[in-house]
Image: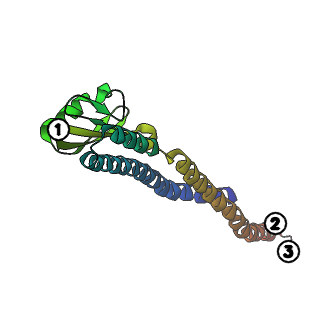
Amino acid sequence: MRTRIIWLVAATTSAVVVAFVVPLCLLVQGVARDRALNRALDQAQRVATLLISVDNVGDLDRSVTGLSSEGPRVLIARGDGTVVGATTIPSESMNAIAKARSSTTAFTEELATGIDVLVPVISETGTDVVLAHASDSELRAGVARAWLVIGGLGALLIAGAIAMARELSRRISVPVTDLAEVAHRLRGGDI
């Protein structure tokens, strides 16, 4: 009887914990992704503002390089074919840059290595494109640790429920066992 009560509580608690832990883990993953994407978008918009306001290419290059060191990698693909903030444009981003130039609208592009945020800026040299890249590691930053904490708390809840079920089952089963023992003695004529 005690074992059945413990198994029942363990199964019920596990089901409830899993029902909360899985969506919570997915939520944490989504929040981390949104945070990295928003940082990349912010970086792209900051560099687009710099591009409009800074005339000196050397100052612009230093500013873009400084911003890239603080967060997602940023570069400017100038309309005249030059690149600011990097030596070359990543090959996987070339099609997206061409699309941003032709559409002149900002958008994001999913890649195998992360997400590109593209912001076109029309200048006297043509359409410049600011490219900010949020890598996969930035999109998953902190997720594994949060999952471990959530899983550990779930396991702790299950272990606590099992410990309480053991004590509860002992309190329930001892009087029932005593009653059964008295009934057996009565049947045998001992009392």
Nearer to me, 21 or 136: 136
Judged from the image, the secondary structure of the residue bearing numbered disc 1 is: strand
Residue beneath disc 3: 191
CA gap between label 2 and label 3 equals 8 Å
Residue beneath disc 2: 188
CA gap between label 1 and label 2 equals 100 Å
Residue beneath disc 1: 127
Q: Mark 1: few, some, or many residues within 10 Å (few <14, many ≥20)?
A: some
Q: How is the image coloured?
A: rainbow
- The quarter of the image holding the C terminus is bottom right
- The residue depicted at 36 percent of the width and 35 percent of the height is 85
Q: Please provide percent x and percent y for residue 35.
A: 40, 52
Judged from the image, the secondary structure of the residue bearing numbered disc 3 is: loop
- From the image, state whether disc 1 or disc 2 is nearer to you: 1
- The quarter of the image holding the N terminus is bottom right
- From the image, state whether disc 3 or disc 1 is nearer to you: 1
User: Tags 3 and 1 in contact by the CB under 8 Å rule?
Assistant: no
Q: Mark 3: few, some, or many residues within 10 Å (few <14, many ≥20)?
A: few
- The residue depicted at 57 percent of the width and 48 percent of the height is 148
Q: Please provide percent x and percent y for residue 23.
A: 43, 54
Q: Amino acid at mark 3?
A: Ile
Q: Amino acid at mark 1?
A: Thr
Judged from the image, the secondary structure of the residue bearing numbered disc 2 is: helix
State left or right for residue 36 relative to residue 95. right
